[in-house]
Amino acid sequence: MKGKYYKLPMDFSQLLQKKDVPAVTLEESVAQHIHLLITTVLGENKDDPQYGCQWWDSDFDIKASNNEVKEQVENAVKMSVVKYEKRLSQIRVVAAVNQEELMLAPARKMKKKIRVTVSGTLAKNNNPFQYTSYFYISPLSYD
């Protein structure tokens, strides 16, 4: 298993049946791990309470400006990736924050859409790496 990277979430039933588990590339594995870091709240991982992203503590701070949210996200994601993703070096994090109206039944909701891009260099082969994702925060809603 050493040197192989596996698709998350892992299907343990395949392991128990002694079947092959789907493998992914190094790039996909790093991207999966960054996604997991970004979407994990501090304290959620009982084995390592520091694993995850600190900015989730301010998810419902509707008074924060887009620039404040952008800075919080960039700093928190970079700290987590630097600490927990050792396969990546020269890490850069860029966030963009926009207001977006979503039609979520039964009402329309205004959400902050955060687009996060993590880039750097894969330590194993010096290839450039980039991961981009987005998510919504701030549950302001109206009819």
Image (tube, rainbow, N blue to C red):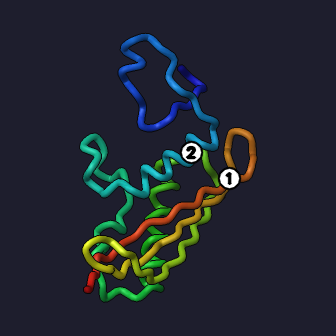
Q: Quadrant of residue 109?
A: bottom left
The answer for how far apart the CA atoms under marks 2 and 1 are is 9 Å
Q: Which residue is mark 1?
A: 129
Viewer-proximal residue, 39 or 109? 109
What's under tag 2, amino acid-wise? Val
**Which quadrant would residue 39 be assigned to in this image?**
bottom left
- 90 sits left or right of 40 in the view: right
- In the picture, measured across the screen, residue 55 lies left or right of residue 131, that is left
Coordinates of residue 17 in the picture (x, y in percent): 39, 12
117 vs 39, left or right, is: right
Disc on res. 37: none
- Say the numbered circle drawn on residue 30: 2
Q: Position of residue 18 (x, y in %)?
A: 44, 11
Identify the residue at horizontal 47%, vertical 78% (top origin). 71
Q: Earlier in the sequence, mark 2 or mark 1?
A: 2
Q: Secondary structure at mark 2?
A: helix
In the image, residue 2 lies at what x, y percent?
56, 22
Residue 21: where, in percent of width, then height?
A: 50, 23
Q: Alpha-carbon neighbours of circle 1 within 10 Å: few (<14), some, or many (≥20)?
A: some
